[in-house]
Structures are given as structure tokens and as C-alpha cells.
Amino acid sequence: MIDFFSILLLLAGALFFLAGTVGLLRFPDLYTRLHALTKADNVGLGLMIAGLALQAESLSAAGKLVLIWGLVLLAGASVAYLIARGALLRGVLPWKR
Amino acid sequence: MEAIDIALGLFDLLLVFLLLWLAWLVMSSEDLFKAIVLFVAFGLLMALVWVRLEAPDIALAEAAIGAGLTGALLMAALDRLNAVKPMPAAAVVTSAKREQPSLPSKVLPLVALVLIVLGLGYALLSLPDVADGLVPNVKEQMAQSGVKNPVTAVLLNFRGYDTLLEMVVLLLALLSVWSLGGVRKLSPRNTNPVLASLCRVLVPVLILVSCYLLWVGADAPGGAFQAGSVLGAAGVLLLLSGWHVEQKILLWPLRFILVLGSGVFIIIAAVLFFTQGGLLTYPVAQAGWLILLLESAATLSIGATLAALFFGGIPKSRVDQ
Amino acid sequence: MNIPMIYALLGITLFSVGLYGLIVREHLLRKILALNIMGSGIFLVLVALGKRSVGDLPDPVPHAMVITGIVVAVSATALALTLMLKLVEVSGSAVLHDAPKERS
Amino acid sequence: MGGLLSDAHWGVLLILLPLFGGLCSFLWPGAVKFIGLATVSAVALSVVGLGDQLLTTGVYHHAVGGWGAPLGIDLYADGLSLFMLMVNALVGLGVSIYALDYFDQGEARRFWPLWLLLLGGLNALFLSADIFNLYVTLEIVGLAGVGLASLSRSGAALDGAMRYLMATLLGSLCYLLGVALLYHSAGTVDIPLLAERLESTPPVWAALGLICAGLALKTALFPLHFWLPKAHASASAPVSALLSALVVKASFYILLRLWLEIFSVRTEGVDDLLGALGMAAIIWGSLQALQQTRLKLMIAYSTVSQMGYLFLVFPLAAAGAFSAWSAVAYLILSHALAKSSMFLVAGNLMHFGGHDRIADLDRAVQRLPITVGAFALAGVSIMGLPPSGGFIGKWLLLNEALNQGRWDLVIVMMIGGVLAAAYIFKVLGFAFTQAPVTHEPKGVPAIMEWSALLLAVAAIVLGFLASPLMLILGIGETVQLMGAGQ
Amino acid sequence: MQLLYITLALFLLVNLAAGMWRVLRGPGVADRMLAAQLFGTTAVAILLLLAEAAGSNALRDAALVFALLAAVTAVAFVKRAWSMQEERDVD
């Protein structure tokens, strides 16, 4: 039962990673790519970590996994903000249809 | 079981291919920034290689340095390069030299490259398939080493003398950088609240992780070099967020921390030499805590040195500017 | 041909590619990157060949050598970068010119 | 008392003392000169102690950490190591005294820590019996060398230092790959064990090629010498002296050591290649030296040519001759003394006239008789005229070449001697004549003049000490040496 | 379970290889950096998967260090390397 949920979460995570990469490759400008990448990948990583945490042998191992996710989230969010702000300040224009 | 081997084999092959491709692109791409980003990616993938080669200790070091510090160093250097290089006169000199290279001068190095790869590859392939190296010797003496992680045992005990000298190398790099004098002014004081809060969270975590790696190094992958690199990263982050310290604090205490690693090593070596009759001969019962002491000092020094190397100039020169 | 040997071969190829870049490219920053790639290649050879032991433990001695090697490589890189910046500051060029300047 | 002296581990002191001194001089910049001079003197005394010990008890062996090879690292010293340590101590003492007055306060604070750590690295290098440990010491020597070469921060110095950094890092990497191949061929990095275990296989050949290439680059063997003239000529005078006298010798020593211990029986052809490059270096370096208009560049090219002589040992020592490599050890010592003296002289002349243009030396002999005298004496040794250390070394080498019927080597050595005489007399000639443009000379501190003279005189005195020095070189009989100590 | 971990790791590596295209293509400096950021997250996931497959706690530490250090590189980029002009090699 646990294995089943694990597999489901891991596969869902992989799907989000795929979506993030497709976004990175296909979206038209920096801001949309930023949007696709940071959100999709962080969710993907979160799902994967949830899947792996279910398998973890101890609570501390699971805790370490969650800590990693938290750090990636924090860094990802801050860096996305910094890049977007930097791009705006440097005059990179958002894409318009 | 078989499917796993195939999947792993594919993973390895893809990794090898990616690394080769990246290395080639780093060398051949026109844009320097692109080369640096590709080099950071190269370091990232190298860490995965170390995992595949069952070298978690190296993977940790590479994760901190190859994928982190080196990238930060290179980017800071590129930034300074753009800042100090507005001279048009120099551009004339370089563009004058930009004639199209002739065909042989393009092809010859490539031919040499292929020949070297073939020669060295042949040499590698004629090595015996099985070789134990020093594994039996290490296993035999592990009980006397005072630690349970064989890599730490080699680093701090069996070949601790090498590590002592490597600490000197590290210090020398910094002395040479300082001897060159300051490179540029510090980045302006940070006003960005997001960056500040990021630092507020990340720096303590980095320091904690560093302590953890130092502590765990005796029994599991980790140790002074990894811990020191992570500590150095904390310093780099502080410097990037425009951290300022009082002049007076920096001068003497910083120097003290910088020499702590090699200094403690030398002092312990000398003391052991006079009491035990041998250079770095630890008494078996005391080996454990002596190694921890050495590693703690080394961690501080490595961290401080890496951060100071990132900073570039002598801290004192800050006031002059 | 086993997996460690493939990584060892990758190591010598990286060494050679780095050597090629070091000789062919002129910009000092590129040369510094080239030296780093060469170093990574050597580290790979050291560690990959240490996996040929029959037991479960890979040879820890090359691991120790490589860990110190990585830290020393980054410090040498930092020194090289600083030297390059100072050179650019003084001479205005990040390329070493072969023509002797002191023919005045 | 004698027992106490010969029991003490001078070898260990030789490594720890300068390293510790280096750290101290970094921590207390106000006392650098005192710490520096005290450390260098202590090192010199320790070399004497080690010499006494080796003469009474034979080769020195120390298993660091008590592990012993192959797991641990061994320290090892025989006659050849002692000789190199003597070079360190003698040149180090001379240059250190000179440096007392040469550098201003700021430069001195940067010079001494780097130089003391360099000295520690060099001592560790000459005492090591472990090829990976040798790599680490090479890194110390290389990085300290770069720091020293860039000490003056002038554009030329930075340019030279950059060239040197690139060359030394590349050389180290080639050497390290060779070490990796040797380790995985024999499962050890201990030189005596390697000598026992290595067979003539493709990986050993590849390692030989890589190590030779890497060390030849560091030693500036023609045609890999491209970095040396700029790096050595543009550094401060004491630094040039250290780089030319000590640093290039360190990598050569490793090559010689590995050759004698590991590679000699397993190789044919490579020795002749190295010999041929050595001959080319002698001719090319001398011709370049002759063409230079600036004194320091001339001296630097002279180093390229003099290093060429050292490489003649490889074809000659293939026959297993003791006299060939002892001749080279002699050459190393005398060249180190003479060349460091020459660079110090160049420093004096630059201090005196503000330039080092050979054509404008302007009767330097009248104002700086001691300095010009030092140059002349050092020149005698470089040319290989009797009675000097250079003469003994070249004479031994020439004899060996004659014995083995290697007329090509004999002729090249003769030509090299004539060319050396030409470039040295050119300088002396200008030192005696009046330059078309006169200038305001500045006084040179006495210490700087006398220390240069001291080194030059030492190079001459070597010519009278052949028999005791040969006795020292015989300790451990390097040819079958390290294994014998086990 | 093992097989799934390895296969997913392989899948993520392919993903990462695809992201290389963005690094090469750019067009802006930030785009390249962004792609490198993706590499960091993906590498963390791959490491964790391999760690689980090998049952190695040390690899989780490595993933942790990765997660931390990727942020440092990115901050270095934002604060330092992101200048207007792009340096070009001379040869």
C-alpha cells in the first residue's frame, strides 16, 4: 500500500519535472520560463521527496528529505524573485502576445 | 536485476556523454559567461559521477566546491573583468591579433588531442582488470586509525602529512592573492530584503550543515574539507549580501583563523614528534580526538580561506578606497 | 569493458580536451577553465581505477587524494583569477602576448 | 653529545621549522625580518646536523605516522637529498641576508611568509620518498613561486607570474596523471616499492611520458622554457635568485630521482631525447642570452642554457655511472650559487642605476667594485673555468662523455662554454666602459653588495671542496639507493 | 522499487540534458542561468533517488549540500556576473 502511494508520488513528480523542462524550452520569454521552471520543478521535487519519505527507514531520514525540500523551495523562490527583479531593472521586457 | 543494470548502464553512458559534451562546449563556446554556466553544470554532473563511483566523500566536496564555490568565484571574476576592462586601447591590440588561424594550426591540435586520447586510453586498457590498491592495508590498520570512515583515516592519519602540506598550499594561495593587493571595491551594501532574509536563513543552515559534516566525518562520509567548503560558502554568501565587519576584528583574528588549520597541524606534529618519536604518530587511544581537533581547526581555516579567496583583496584595503 | 573503465576513459578524454583548450584558446579565463577540466579528468582516473578491487570497499586512498585535490584546485583557481584581474588592470588585456614588449 | 646530534631527527625539523616560521611571520608582520632570518639560520644549522648524522649513520629514514610504506609516507635522505638541502640552505641564507635591505617594509611583509613556506616546501620535497607527497610539495613550491614572482606588482612581473602559474599548474597536472597511472599499476606511491614492483607496461610508459613532460615544463627544458625568461627576469632580484637557483632545480631533482630509482632500467630512447633537448637548450639559451640587451633577461636565458647541461646526465647515466649524476649534483649546487649571485648583482645594478640595460652599465666597476667582482666570480663558475664549482661539475660531465665516446655531448658543452664566456664578458666589458648617457647613480647598501659577493665566492670555493663533497654524495650511493635503506 | 528509482533518475538526467539546449541557446544571460538553476533542482532529485536506491545516507547529505550551494551560485550570479555587456573571447 505504501509502495503504491510512493510510486504514484514519484511518477507524478517526474511528470512535473517534465512539464518544467518543456516550459523552459518552449515558453517565449524569461519571465514565463522562470514561472514554469521554478514552480513546476519545486512541486516535482516536493512530490518526489514525499514519495521517497514514505520509504525512508527512519523519521530523521524523512526529516532530512523535508529539510532539503524546504531549502530548495526557499532558494528557488528567492532566486526567481531576484532574477525577475534584476531582469526588470535591466530592462528585459515581458513578452506580449 | 538485469533491467536495473541496463538502466544504470544507460545512466552512466548518458552522464559520460553529457560531461564530454559540456567539457567541449566550455572550451569551444564563444561567450565566456556561457562557458562559465556550462562549467558549473559540469561540476554538478561531476558530483553525480562521484556518486556512481561510490565516492560519497568526494561527491560532498564536489557538491560544495565544483557546483557552488567555483561558480561563484568565476562569476565574480567575470564581473570584475568587465569592470576593470573599459580601455579601448587594449581592444585594438587584441583585435589586431585576430587574424583567421590557418588550417594546420586548427587541425594539428585536434590531431594531437586524438593521439593523446588514444595513447592514454591504450595505456589504461592494458591495466589489469582487478587490482586491490591499498585496500587490504587500509582494512588491516583501520582499527588503529581512531576513526571509522576509511577516507578520513587516510586523510588525517595514514597520509596526514600530505594533508598538513595541502593546508599550507591553501594558505599559500591566499598569501599570494593578498600579496597581489586588492582587486576592486566591495559590492555596495545590500538593500534587497529578499536577499537579506535568504541569507538570514541560509547562513545558519550552512553553518549547521558544516558542523554536522565535520562531526559525522569520523564515521561516515564527510570531514574537514567538506565542512570547510560549506563554511566557506556561508562566508561567500555573507560577502555577496554586502556584509561588513569592523576593521579591527578582521585584522588579527582573521589571520589567526587562517593559520589555525596548518598551525595546529604543525604544532601537533611537533608535539607528537617529541613525545612519540615520530612525525604525526598518534597514540592509538588518543587518535580519535586528536583527529577531531585537527579537523575542527582545518574546517575553520578552510572556510575562512575560501571566503577570503572569494573576497580577493586584503580586507584592510577596504578603507583605502 | 566495465563501468569504472568507461569513467576512467572519460577522465583521460577530459584531460586531453582541457589540454587542447589550454593550448588553443587565448583568453586567460578560458585557460583557467581548461586547467580545471584537466584536473577533473585526472581525479576521475584516480578514483575510477580505484574501483577495481574485488572487495566491497573502493580504494579510499585515491578518494583522500582527490578531496584535497579539489580544495587545492579551487584555491589555485582563485589565485589564477586574481592574477588575471590584476594583469587586466595593468595591461588592459586578458591575453598573454608573445611578442616581447620591452623592445624599446 | 655527538650521539645526541646524530640521533636527532634533523629531517623533520627541516620541514617543520620553516613552515612554522612562515606562519609566524604571517601572524606577526612587524617581526618578519627577525623571524625570517632566525628560521633560515636554524634551517642551515639543521642541514649541518643532518649532514653530520648522514655521515655517521648513513641514509635517513622516517616513517611518518609510524605506518611506513605503502600505507604511510616515508621521509628519506641520502647524499643527493643532502646536497639539495645544502643548496637550499646556502642560497637561502645568502638571499635572505640580501633581502633584509632590498625590500621596503610593505614588500618585506609579503616576501618573508611566502619565502619561508617555499623553503619548507623545498625541504619537504628533497626529503620525500613518496611520489604523491612530491606532488603536494610541488604545489607548495609552485604557488609560493607565483606569489613571489608577482611580488613587485609591476605589469611585467604580473605577466611573468601568470606565465609561470600556467606552466607550473600544467606541469603539476601532467605529473599527477602520471602518479595516478603509477599508483594504479603498482598499488603504491612509495618510490622504493615502485622500483620493485613496476614492470615495463604501457601504463608505466604513459606515466613516464607524462611525468617527464610535466617536470621538463617546470624545469624549463628547451623547448618548454617559454615561460622562464619573462617570469625570472621580471621578478624582484631576490625572487629571481630564488626561482632560478632553487625552484627550477626542485622539479629537476624529482626527475633525476625518479629516473635513477624507477625509470632508468625500463626505458630506452627517452634518455637520448632528453639529452638532445638538453643540448638544444645549451645552444639556444646561450645564443638568446648573447642577444639580450637587458641584464636580467640575459641571466634568465643563461639559466635556460645551464639547465640544459643538467639534462645531459640522462644519456650518460644510462650506463649507470656514478660520476655522471654526481657531476650533475655538483653543477646544480654551483649553478645555484653562481646564478643567485648574478641575479643579486643585477638587483644591485638596478638599484644603482635604475635600469638593467647592459649597454648603459657605465663604469659600474668604479662605483660598485664588489658587485662587479661578484658578477665576475659568478661568471667564472657559469663559464666553467677553473678553479670553480662549475668547472668541477662540467669537467666531471665532460670526462664521462669522453669515456662513453659521446662526442656530440662534448662538442656542445665546449660550444656552450665559449658562448657563456661571450655573454659574460660582454657584460663585464660594458661595466668597464663609459656609457654614452650618464645618469645619477644611487648608493647600494653594503649588505646587498656583500651577500652577492659571498654567494659568488662560495661558487668558487666549491672548486676546492671536491673530495669532501663527493664523500657526501656517496652516502647511500644513489644508484641503488632507496631500496638499500630498507 | 530499485528499478523505478534508477529509471526515474535516468529520466531526470534526460530532462537535464534537454535543458542544456536553453543554456546554449540563451538568448539572455539570465536564461542560461535559469537553466543552470534547473540543473541544480534536478540534480538534487537525482541524488535523492540514487541515495534511496543505494540506501546511502551520505548521498542525502550530498543532496542537502547541493540544495544549499545552488543558491550561492545563483546569488553570485545575480549580484556579480549579471552585467550589461557580455564578455567575448578573443580568439
Image: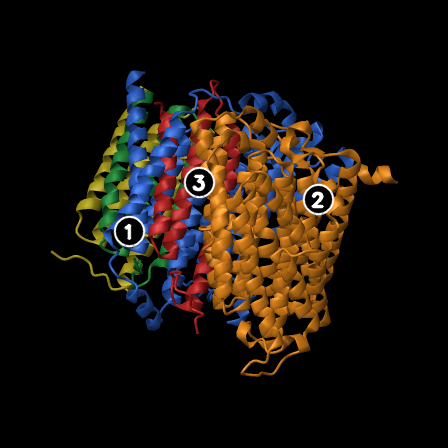
Chain colours: A yellow, B blue, C red, D orange, E green
Residue type at numbered disc 2: Ile
- In primary-sequence order, the first of circles 1 and 2 is 1
Residue type at numbered disc 1: Ser
Image coordinates for residue D140, horizontal then vertical, percent: 57, 48
Q: Which element type, helix, strand or loop, lies under badge 3?
A: helix
Image coordinates for residue D49, horizontal then vertical, percent: 78, 44
Q: CA distance from mark 1 to mark 2?
A: 54 Å
Residue type at numbered disc 3: Glu
User: Is residue A47 visible from the viewing direction of this image?
Assistant: no
Where B309 sits versus A3, above or below? below
Check disc 1 and report the residue beneath it: B105
Callout 2: residue from which chain?
B
Q: Nearer the viewer, residue D331 or E23?
A: D331
| Quarter of the image that includes the N terminus of chain B | top left
Label 1: few (<14), some (14–19) or many (≥20) C-alpha neighbours in 10 Å: few
Check disc 2 and report the residue beneath it: B267
Q: Which element type, helix, strand or loop, lies under badge 1?
A: helix
